[in-house]
Image: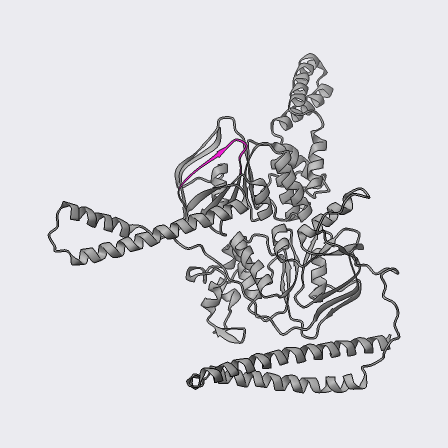
Amino acid sequence: MSIIDAQDLSKAYGARKLLSGVNLTIRSGERVGVVGLNGAGKSTLARILAGLEAPDWGSVARQRGATVQYLSQAPVFEGDPTAEACVTAGLGEWHRAAERHAELSRRLASEPGSLPELLEEQARAAEDVERLGGWDQHHRVRTLLGQLGVHRPEARLSTLSGGEQRRVALAQVLVAAPSLAILDEPTNHLDAETIEWLEQFLLNEYTGALLLVTHDRYLLNRVATRTLEVSEGQVYSYDGGYELYLEQKAERLAHAERTERNRQNFLRTELEWLRRQPKARGTKQKARIERAEQAQGVRAPKADKSFTFEVDVARQGKRLLELSELTLAVGGQPLVSGLDLIVAQGERIGIIGRNGTGKTTLLRAIVGQLMPTSGRVVLGQTTRIAYFDQERSDLDPSKSVFDNVVGDQPQIEFGGQAIEPYAYLERFGFGSKDYRQLVGSLSGGERARVALARLLRRPANLIILDEPTNDLDVASLGALEDLLVEFSISALCVTHDRWFLDRVASSILAFEGDGKVVRYAGNYQALAEQRQGAAKPQGAAKPQGAAKPQGDMRRTPENEPRERKKKKALSWSETRELEGLLDRIEQAESEVVRLSSELAAPETYQRSPGDIMALNTALDAARSSVDQLTLRWEELETKRAELEADGRA
């Protein structure tokens, strides 16, 4: 039985058409995922189905008696109730029955003359409360809030953070158990552990139909029984979750490509025939002309918009970052206690933990925005950080996309080459119609792409990302994953996106509360297997391939390295080597410039192919020499600084 049946839906904002002739049915118990690029119309479709926005054309029919609840990306509440009262209001009929019972109880105390009638009404209200779930609903509400990370149910909504308010709104929808729940990006502001809980709740406890707009690919893959893609005004339906959607979409695109190829071949044949024929034509010939004209009027399928994120990787040493006995506390509450961590070249560390445990605080200490309570943060001599903060605070919402990314620069230097600003912006999915759009008017995902474009225009060798996956669509997430993996760049990434962590992370830094931070080898799946193994009774078999924890990163007597006889300075030969390294690096870099200039000259290509090949080989060798000399210089310089510091101590 269908809960919602939408026919011929169309919606446009100005000249921008989001939906065009969309037909869609959602049946009882269905779990439907929705994907699409930022700005494609996913949230607009969700609001129309929820009855919060009217289509320009078309209709939405709802099953009689069906209830529909909608979770907005920016929920709005009436008044300023407590978190518990707000969620309890989601119980609808039960809440009204409980309120009626409480009101009758108050009247019994103040109107003794109406005792029989009031007692009878109170008994009916009590029966309604029992029928609708009993008197223990307040406990259920508090449990649900706790599972979603809201630990102050008595707090007023105005005192909660934006993320906490959104979790309250999610709890209100879940506790109502509607016929259809429409959830727009429900995993934003949730940590990975809470997302796993939500996933299990939707699979095992929630019995209604579900429309899930999300970029969380694990959640889509495990919960959705059907996936809708919103693209170019159309809605395409695929059976199954995210993986099956990818397979079926690839088949659809291949079929569309074959169809277009056949249409083009037909047009070429017919046009050639038309050119050869005389003006006077019979009935059959006219029919053939009409078929050719119809084929010519068919729109070719538009290719999916794709993104290519690139980074200009700065010269880097073996050790980019070292944290030594780092302790961080906020308001007297310890968040990180005695953390030792080394980030080496090419490492990509995913950072996870419950909200409020100190993940963002750690990043702010690394980039110098926050002073440690104790301990040291040491950057390598050649470390260049690109920091993507959660608030996208580097952007000016009153300026355009172009002005935020490019400013007054005529060209962008990237990888030693000058790039036209418009060509650079196209890599991040911004076409000519987007350049002058104000950043403040963009969607969250579009703003995130502007922030990435601004961030990646400068050379870097350590990228620090704080919740980069919030608001980004699946295509943008794939481009960001490709950037981190293919460029082998070092990264620290706070994220709740398990798919992202499984694809990108080489190790996981887990915030486990009370200042304890543990590093695990491998990706998120390896961490999950390790934790499952640790939770098994002693003697149970360990899962195959489970990652081994690197241990509690706080220094203890057991893991303290043995004392060695301290040296006070570099050896004589190391000192002489260090003194000459900068000159050698400069000579090697000059050779790179000379060879690059020679290869760029047009007359070079009048030589034999063997000469050109020799020049390319020499250039590769010169670049390798620069890298090796720089690594050695950084190694000796770091060693010298550490020995001098030990000597002063």
Residue pushed farthest top? 116
**How far across and down, in percent of the image, does residue 249 sit?**
46, 48
Residue 70 vs 429, above or below: the answer is above
Q: Quadrant of residue 76?
A: top right
Q: Is residue 248 visible?
A: yes
Residue 485 vs 7, above or below: the answer is below
Residue pushed farthest left? 280
The residue at the point 71 percent across, 40 percent down is 146
Q: Is residue 330 magenta?
A: no
Q: Nearer the viewer, residue 257 or 453?
A: 257
Quadrant location, the C terminus: bottom right
The residue at the point 57 percent across, 44 percent down is 221
Q: Nearer the viewer, residue 425 or 461?
A: 461
Residue 205 vs 230, above or below: the answer is above
Q: Find the magenta span and give its range.
A: 22-31
Image check: 539 left or right of 505?
right
The residue at the point 54 percent across, 43 percent down is 241
Q: Total of numbered circles in the picture?
A: 0
Q: Is residue 90 visible?
A: no
**How far across and down, in percent of the image, does residue 5 sit?**
45, 33
**How far across and down, in percent of the image, does residue 201 sit?**
64, 37
Q: Is residue 29 magenta?
A: yes
Q: Nearer the viewer, residue 464 or 125?
A: 464
**How far across and down, in percent of the image, does residue 560 sit?**
86, 63
The residue at the point 63 percent across, 69 percent down is 461
